[in-house]
Image (spheres, helix red, strand yellow):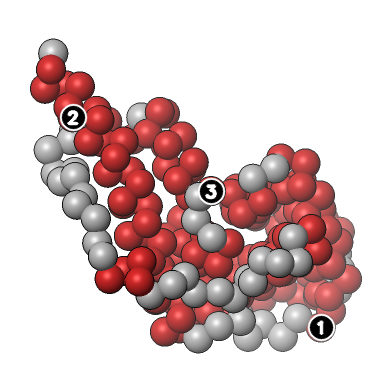
Amino acid sequence: MTKAASSSADRSLQLLRAQDREAFAGLVEETSPQLYGLLLRILNDEQDAEDILQETYIKAFAALPAFEGRSSLKTWLFRIATNEALMLIRKRKPQIQLVEIDDDDELDSPKELVDWCCIPEPELMNTETRKKLDEAIQHLSVGLRTAFLLRDVQGLSGEETASIMGISVDNVKTRLLRARLKLREELSVYFGERLNHADQK
């Protein structure tokens, strides 16, 4: 980062800490698409995602004067949003353990997976495949889904993900491995059917 860019970032942070509404509106415009996408995939409900997004910014605005900058603003907002989403899930489904790790025996008996190497990239990126991936993500447990979304979809670091979820980096790695395996297993069925269909043509 250049000195000019650093100075601009410092100035923006000062304005945000002073609860400057124009600066905050800019922050909302910049970060809301990512935050909404994350919340929609965690909660799987548009209205819930919109409500939690609004609640996230309300809480963030109130807390900005005390923001110390130990993490980036983006990570800080992700932490607020994720916590709010998980609290909503806990409130509605108190039986769900948000810090659960799935049973070890699920990794002890790996399924046969389809090799994706021969599937053209457009097939991997088309609308139907993305929809299938979103469906598979929803089949993950809350803990695995959240780790996968923060780490692989939003591109946060292991340390950032651990901080947001309140778990260790090792636990993040474990959940990420389990999430990837479960997604690969489920999507392998889908791709296997597509490859078989293509072979029959």
Say if 17 sits above or below 179 in the image.
below
Q: CA distance from mark 1 to mark 3?
A: 35 Å
Q: Nearer the viewer, residue 53 or 85?
A: 85
Which amino acid lies under the numbered mark 2 shown in the image of this protein? Leu
Q: CA distance from mark 1 to mark 2?
A: 55 Å
Percent of width and height locating residue 106: 36, 66
* Mark identifier at residue 66: 1
Which amino acid lies under the numbered mark 3 shown in the image of this protein? Gln
Left or right of 121 on screen, residue 12: right
Label 3 vs 2, first from the N-terminus: 3
Which residue is at the far top? 201
Tag in front: 1 or 3: 3
**Label 3, on which residue?**
138
Mark 3, secondary structure of its residue: helix
Q: Is residue 77 visible?
A: no
Q: Residue at x 71, y 67 (%)?
A: 95
Q: CA distance from mark 3 to mark 2?
A: 24 Å
**Label 2, on which residue?**
195
Query: What is the tally of numbered marks visible in this picture?
Result: 3
Q: Residue at x 49, y 64 (%)?
A: 144
